[in-house]
Amino acid sequence: MLGDFASGERRGGPPTDRMLRPGDLMIVDFFPIVRGYRADITNTYVAGQPSDAQRRYMDLLLRAKEAGEAMLRPGVTGGEVYAAVQKVFKEAGVAEHFPHHAGHALGLMHPEPPFFVPASKEPLQEGQVVTLEPGLYDPAVGNMRVEDDYLITADGFERLSNHVKGFA
């Protein structure tokens, strides 16, 4: 089991001596490895009660992940998946706070292609395992990310992860 736990201005990296304060967000990103194969799941938690802006961003993350899920099927490109996720953020006026990919494939390495980035032309294939991980990183609100893993099936996907997303 590997993981990355980040709060404050960080999105990841080595541990620091920073202490959580009320209202702080913490991204908890786990990378379990079973028989050499990797998974990758994430949720964001808040110390105390979330602000209205944090609740809004969490709702946007979950909506963006659902938009990405709607695209998960053989033949769809990584770029098309990214565009579906990014559209939610653009329509909400927060696209500048989504600076990274929308997900990637998983296997013996982490990450693997296809990558869900704007220029990706690689199509999804039945039998691939992928992750969707939209994130918003706004200094005024905090850093947030959610993530699930999926098996691409002949007619869509099967969600492989079953953890609670959102402020539990």
Image: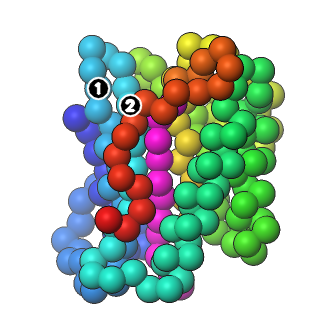
Indicate the position of residue 113 as horizontal and vertical percent values.
61, 25
**Which x, y percent locates residue 72?**
67, 32
Residue 112 visible in image: no
Q: Residue at left 47%, top 47%?
A: 147
| Residue shown at the point (49%, 76%) measured from the top left | 55
Compared across the picture, whether 166 is left or right of 116 comes to left
The image quarter in which residue 71 lies: top right
- In this view, 49 is above or below 94: below
Residue 25 marker: none
Query: Is disc 1 in contact with disc 2, using a CB cutoff of under 8 Å?
Result: yes
- What is the three-letter code of the residue carrying label 1? Ile
What segment is highlighted magenta in the picture? Answer: 139-150
What is the quadrant of the N terminus in the image?
A: top left
* Amino acid carrying mark 2 in the image: Ala
Q: Is residue 108 left or right of residue 46?
A: right
Which residue corresponds to mark 1?
33
Instruction: Judge whether residue 148 is colored magenta.
Output: yes
x and y percent of residue 65 in the render? 59, 50
The image position of residue 166, as x and y in percent, is: 42, 62
Q: Tell me if residue 33 comes above or below residue 162 in the rendering.
A: above
First in residue order: circle 1 vs circle 2: 1
Residue topped by disc 2: 39
